[in-house]
Amino acid sequence: MAISTPLRFVPEDGVFALMTIDPVASLECLHDPEALAMAASLTFNDYLVFVPGTNQSRNLEAPYREEVVHFVLPQRPNDVPERFIDAAMSVPIHPTLDETHPEREPLETLGEFPWPGCFLSPFIGATVRTRIMLSVDPIVCELALSQRKRWKRYEKEDRHRQADREVEVARSIWSSTDSGYESDSFGTITNNINLSCGSVGADKHSLIDGGHIELEFAPIGLGEGELDIPLTVTFTHDLKRMEEMSDPFEFFLEKEALERIGREALERNKREVGSRKIKQSRILPLQVEFCDQSGRMPRFLPSLFSTAAVALVAYLYLVWTSKEMAAIAPLKSLVVPALSKHTATVIFVHGLGDSGLGWQPVAEMLNKELPQVKWVLPNAPTMPVTANGGMVMPSWFDILSFGFDSKEDREGMLKTVYSLNQLISAEVDAGIPANRIVLGGFSQGAAMTLLTGLTGERKLAGLAVLSGWLPLRANFKSMVSDHAKSYPIFWGHGAADPLVRHDLAVKSVDFLRESIGLNTSPRCRRADRAILQLVSWR
């Protein structure tokens, strides 16, 4: 089976696409299929459909088989067999990012659907329960519908031209604002002072003249008419007086001033650019580095190792960290309202690559059993995930290895803890007591559920952990709250989970029981209907 590369498809006529899956190509495209569909001018009534990968003996000129046509009709959007969904959610395989032939797992089929030989997408954490599924293969796709719908792929030169057009669009959008920057500065890279933040940049007039500052902008999510173009703009700042500084305190005052500029830029990222609004998809930590033109650090820095200077550095770092946390944008959430009087809230945190929308059917199903409960389903920001080859996807923190035994993204985890605590505070402010709020999550979201619930100031009604693990175990005892050991916790885990292994969950449970005497339910007994047990656990 040939390995394909990420390609962009454009409809010539019609709104249906039938494409094959590839473990490398699908990673980039599947992280936000709805956004990609919007970029292709599709609507939520249009469908991109999973089909088997190609092989060397297949006639690439032939149209795809008629058996799948019923699957893509927008009038019948629920024709996805349930076992097909379950298999795609629970049997992911690890992709290979080199040129070797990737191993693939056969997809469990329902009868003859789609047909024997179908392969499962190895995208880790992908959700096919959303309204759009996407996979790609470098061939022209034809559908045998009532009238033919054709999709064509860009040739290499077409894709290069498309990339050039996107750069020009970014330049024109930036030059259309009142900031006064020349388009020549787009994409310029400097190394003198780096100030990174996750939004459109600061106003020229708020900066000190001279020198260089680079603002790097995170990719901006596409949705509801928003822009999807990363921007990089270079500013200037005079470094001469930095060389004349002899007092470390002056240095850190300067550093704090530049970081304040970055925070002000974050606040301005909601302004309109033309007729479209910028949407901040994630916030990078503000980082400022000073050096002279040769790349050397200022000569006074060795004095920072004095006791007083170290204390000052620690104090300024703590102050800056608290301010940085306060600048984190609130999470956007999908809300499923209570069917009767609202007296309780469940905040449920999705897993890697998913969204709140992926858990909406579960919330709506359980709403019938729990009519007094409002469901808050937050959406993770998008970020590069190291373990997935740096692909950008919805994630609560960076995962450095799927072995979960390497260095952890402590900073990213703590930012998510802060954001989830904001959601809890919002419910309390709305009149729901903390002891009527349950925090739950799946996989990566379950890890954040544990970390947030067991370290938070408020004692919630309980925690629901599905296929999760305890992160930051090395530091956990110093972080845990006084009431953590009295927390009721429902803990369920798939015994055959290939990603977050069952033994990792068992080790996490054992650690919590031994370290703080935590009580969990069920006590590692086998259960076929975990969701029903979770409902009865209330």
Image: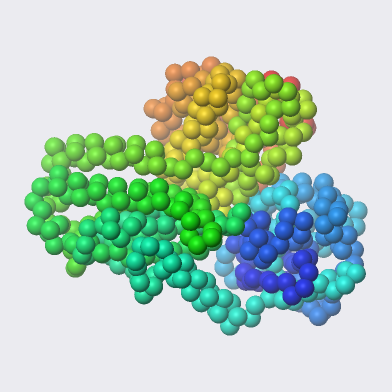
Point out the residue furthest to the bottom here: 157
Residue found at x 88% / y 60%? 70
Give residue 113's position: percent from left, percent from top.
87, 57
- Where does the image place residue 297, in percent across and percent down from the top left? 18, 58
Q: Is residue 54 visible?
A: yes
Tally the marks: 0
**Quadrant that contains the C terminus:** top right
- The answer to whether residue 248 is left or right of residue 507 is left
**Residue 340, how many percent across, how many down?**
73, 23
Residue located at (55% from left, 25% from top):
430
**In the image, residue 266 above or below residue 524:** below
Q: Nearer the viewer, residue 127 or 32?
A: 32
* 448 w.r.t. 30: above or below: above
Question: Could you tell whether 147 is left or right of 437 in the image?
Answer: right
x 68%, y 25%: residue: 373
In screen coordinates, is 507 left or right of 369?
A: left
